[in-house]
Amino acid sequence: MTTEGFPDSLGPLLAGLQRLIRRRLRSNHERPLARGAQIELLRLVVDRPGISVSDAARELYLAGNSVSTLVNQLGRAGFLTRETDPDDRRSARLMPSAAAEARVRDWETRRAALVSERVALLSEADQAALAAAVPALRRLADGLREEVEGV
C-alpha cells in the first residue's frame, strides 16, 4: 500500500463522511439544523449542560462571537436557553431544552445505526482495516488537539 497523497486526502475524506452522514440522517419532517457547527454546539450543550459560551467556544475551537451567533440561532429555534451564572452574574450558562435532548438522542441513535449498517456491508477485510485505524485516528486527533491547545 502506498501512502503518497494519503495525508492530503484524509481531511477531506473525513469531512465528507461527516457531511454525508448528516445528509442521510435528515428526515423530511424535521427542520434541519443549518450547519454542522450548530449540531456540534447542540451536542456539546446536551453533553455538558451549563457550559459557558467561552468554554463552548474553546471546546469547539471557534471564536466566541461565532458561538454567540450559534447560541442565538439555536435559542430562536427553541433548542437552547441562556441562564445567568449564579457565581458570576455577567456570565451565562447554556442549557438544552427537552426538544434538544430528544433531538440529539434521536440523532445519535440513528447515526450509530446508519454507520453500523453501512460498515456491515463492507468486506471483512475492510471492516478490520477500519477497526485497526481507529486507535491511530484517535492519536492523530489527540496530537492535533494538543497542538491547538498548546499542551
Image (cartoon, rainbow, N blue to C red):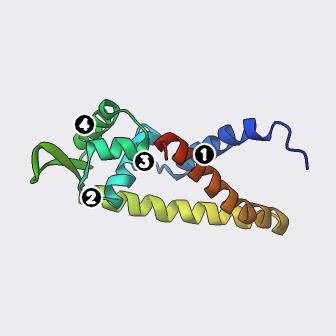
Q: What separation in Å lies between label 4 and label 2 (alpha carbons)?
A: 16 Å
Q: Earlier in the sequence, mark 1 or mark 2?
A: 1
User: Dot 4: what SS?
Assistant: helix
Residue topped by disc 3 = 40
Q: Residue at x 46, y 48 (%)?
A: 28
Q: Nearer the viewer, mark 1 or mark 2?
A: 2
* Residue 84 pos. (x, y %): 11, 48
As drawn, which residue projects farthest toward the front?
151
Query: Which image quadrant for residue 132?
Result: bottom right
Name the one closer to the observer, 56 or 40: 56
Q: What separation in Å lies between label 3 and label 4 (alpha carbons)?
A: 15 Å
Residue topped by disc 1 = 20
Query: Which image quadrant for residue 144?
Result: top right
Q: What separation in Å lies between label 4 and label 1 (alpha carbons)?
A: 26 Å
Q: Is residue 38 above or below residue 121?
A: above
User: Dot 2: what SS?
Assistant: loop
Identify which amino acid the numbered label 2 is placed on. Answer: Pro
Q: Nearer the viewer, mark 1 or mark 3?
A: 3
Q: Earlier in the sequence, mark 4 or mark 2?
A: 2
Q: Earlier in the sequence, mark 3 or mark 4?
A: 3
Q: Residue at x 73, y 59 (%)?
A: 133
User: Dot 3: what SS?
Assistant: helix
Using a 10 Å C-alpha cutoff, classify the residue at mark 2 as few (fewer than 14 neighbours), some (14 to 19) or many (20 or more). Answer: some
Q: What separation in Å lies between label 3 and label 2 (alpha carbons)?
A: 14 Å
Using a 10 Å C-alpha cutoff, classify the residue at mark 4 as few (fewer than 14 neighbours), some (14 to 19) or many (20 or more). Answer: some
| Residue 72: mark in rendering | 4
Q: What separation in Å lies between label 1 and label 3 (alpha carbons)?
A: 15 Å
Identify which amino acid the numbered label 1 is placed on. Answer: Leu
Q: Residue at x 27, y 58 (%)?
A: 49
* Residue 114 pos. (x, y %): 59, 61
